[in-house]
Image (cartoon, helix red, strand yellow):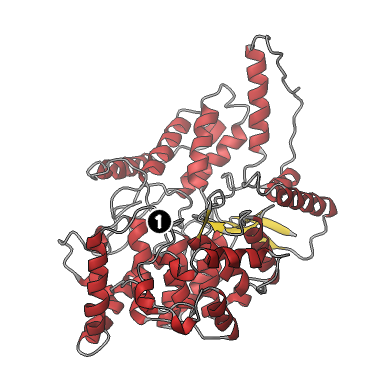
Amino acid sequence: MWRLKIAEGGADPWLRTKNAHVGRQVWEFDAAADDPDALAAVDAARREFAARRHQLKHSADLPMRIQLAKENPLKLDLPAIKLGENEDVTEEAVSTTLRRALSTFSTLQAHDGHWPGDYGGPMFLMPGLLIMLHVTGALNTVLSSEHQKEIRRYLYNHQNEDGGWGLHIEGPSTMFGSALTYVSLRLLGEGPDSGDGAMEKGRNWILDHGGATYITSWGKFWLAVLGVFDWSGNNPLPPETWMLPYCLPVHPGRMWCHCRMVYLPMCYVYGKRFVGRITPIILELRNELFKVPYSEVDWDSARNLCAKEDLYYPHPLIQDILWATLHKFVEPVMMHWPGNKLREKSLNHVMQHVHYEDENTRYICIGPVNKVLNMLACWIEDPNSEAFKLHIPRIYDYLWVAEDGMKMQGYNGSQLWDTAFAVQAIAATDLIEEFAPTLKLAHDFIKNSQVVDDCPGDLSYWYRHISKGAWPFSTADHGWPISDCTAEGLKASLLLSKISPEIVGESVEVNRLYDAVNCLMSWMGSPLLYSHQNQSGAV
């Protein structure tokens, strides 16, 4: 059965950490586990979710709750409060209800002090991982048969009634979600008629809406990597843009961090025109995804095609002119001498930045999209590289198991964010001493999760911001500084500093609090002020 492991990884020589893996949450399958009651409860939860999947899209983290209920049994001797329609709410009723709620909440706390949980939802994350693992030949090595079984469960569970898949689990069907999820299931061993007709329904949705030529730009990119879409059907992602003077407003270093950290490795893969090995499954997908024979697809027209279900904002004409100019005139120059010399130099420059991001996030990366793209870029650069091997164990930081299956999360978790708010909520009650063990564990986690160093080197060269003293959204190993997480981490720390250390432990050192304030003050100069994702150099 699946078991949630917290703050583990010390035995793996390919894992790097700043704080003994505090906050790390990884699901592992234990074939030898002997807990028939827990297995039966999880199986029942899976069946119930599948039966109601079109009415209730979200899981309730029942595998985790079942596990933690055994590890942290609830010790509660308080009656449930039920008020009549016209009954007054008394202080005793509120106090009893609050005690019951906090008692239950404390049993969900991990031993390192944070509250683990599902941070899934997007449907376009897992396909990138599966395509990357397939083209690098690592799919069956990295993902066991049990991993693949749970991923298939998740993808089938979140298929819409019309046969397609959405951008996210609550969204209507899109070509982006449908084509990539269909491809994912095929790479996981499902046939074109598997799933009691589910695969056929998915394929029909794709073809009824124009076929895969109408997929969005990220979808075109991943299908080109896989070998079921031609690179000439993609609008250019020239790596030379990273060589432009930073003073230019179009320099990618000025982009929002999540945007530029995705397009950074994309530029490398595009510049290399990498295509995975053409195998029988790839040839089958070429036949299944398009309305015309693959050899007859008009790739130049496909560059700007987008299904109406995916079109949130049409391209302005100037953008189409720019893409056409790059595609028809600039790219041919860069593919041949002497332009290919600049292309090679640009690709090397891009990979320097990819490696910097990897090393300074302990190979977690800022998020799941650039995580798998960076990993692919490292493999293209050198399939036997140490960088690729260091990426592998951090894949599991993004995978989460619930009763709906295994998903790829939108981050490696929300550990610090959730813990900071939990502390503030408990501190707002008069039950601090009663829940001292819970607060002390949370306090330890907050202290262990603060970023204590800036990234090395010239931060402006790497388009990064100071991070010493900041708090991340998830873990210290992730390390990207975030403005509102820093504010909430600081607020929680200050609240805890007002409580006796005999109750909640020693306070955060004053100098570290000053460092946090320094980060917050530095972000005040950002045009976006205290937004969640502010300067180009900081999250």
**Residue in the foreground of this view, choosing between 320 and 153:** 320
Residue 291 percent across, percent down from the top left: 51, 74
Residue 475, compared with residue 421, is above or below; it is below
The residue at the point 45 percent across, 37 percent down is 507
Q: Amino acid at mark 1?
A: Leu
Quadrant of the snapshot with the N terminus? bottom right
- Residue at the far right in the pictured view: 36
Query: In the image, 319: left or right of 41?
Result: left
Residue 275, compared with residue 400, is above or below; it is below
Residue 83 percent across, percent down from the top left: 70, 15
Residue 400 percent across, percent down from the top left: 61, 56
The residue at the point 37 percent across, 44 percent down is 532
Residue of label 1? 311
Query: In the image, 267: left or right of 104?
Result: left
Q: Can I make out residue 108 in this image?
A: yes
Which type of secondary structure does the marked residue at label 1 adopt? loop
Residue 209 percent across, percent down from the top left: 50, 63
Q: Residues within 10 Å of mark 1 (few under 14, many from 20)?
A: few
